[in-house]
Image (cartoon, rainbow, N blue to C red):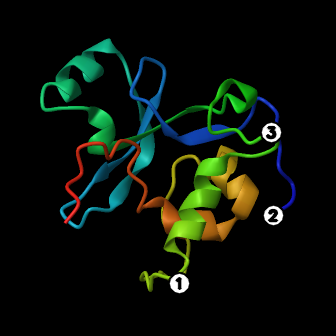
Amino acid sequence: MDSINAGADRSCPSARCEPGAKLLGVKGADGRIHNLRTAMAVDDEFITTASKVGPPEQRMRFSSHCATNGCSQWTGNRCGVIDRVLTHIEGFHLPKSDGLPACPIRATCRWFDQTGAKACHACSYVVTDNASAVVE
């Protein structure tokens, strides 16, 4: 998609767990993120509870306002995260559904705006914080 909108109406689908963010999905036993039907508002109480068992970003996905130039992932005209994800998974034979997966932010999603359905099919494989992931 070439209609990249750098305006304030785009959502980042890989944000930090902080007040004002929205919970998009939860990591399942299969290692994939399973989206909620409706995004849930994140507040201090949620963060305190979710942080008791480690960084929430290792088990959940969050969304917030796309910061464009205020984000280290911004390349100058687009989000570099989804481009790197798509390049990384290019050679994998990942299962795809016929339709798009449920998503509570698709209408404003920066990744969908940039790359369309390809982003939706890759999205469930993205974990924002995988710092403690074990490499075998």
Residue situated in front as seen by the camera: 37 or 58: 58
| Relative vertical location of residue 136 with respect to residue 54 in this rendering, above or below | below
Which amino acid type corresponds to the residue marked 1 in the rendered image? Asp
Residue at point 74%, 42% (across, down): 75
Give the alpha-carbon distance from disc 3 to disc 2, as whole Å: 17 Å
Report helix, strand or loop for mark 2: loop
List the residue tagged with mark 3: 76
Q: Kindly give the residue lying farthest to the top in the view shown.
A: 44
Residue 3 falls left or right of residue 17: right
Mark 1 or 3: in front is: 3
List the residue tagged with mark 2: 1
Percent of width and height locating residue 117:
64, 69
Of mark 2 and mark 1, the one earlier in the sequence is 2
* The N terminus, quarter of image: bottom right
Percent of width and height locating residue 24:
43, 44
Q: To which quarter of the image does residue 85 belong?
A: bottom right
Percent of width and height locating residue 71:
64, 29
Of mark 1 and mark 3, the one earlier in the sequence is 3
Percent of width and height locating residue 14:
50, 42
Residue at point 30%, 42% (across, down): 131
Residue 34 falls left or right of residue 132: right
Give the alpha-carbon distance from disc 2 to disc 1, as whole Å: 19 Å
Residue at point 74%, 54% (across, down): 113
* The C terminus, quarter of image: bottom left
Using the image, tell me which numbered label, if any, was put on residue 98: 1
Which amino acid type corresponds to the residue marked 3 in the rendered image? Gly
Which amino acid type corresponds to the residue marked 2 in the rendered image? Met
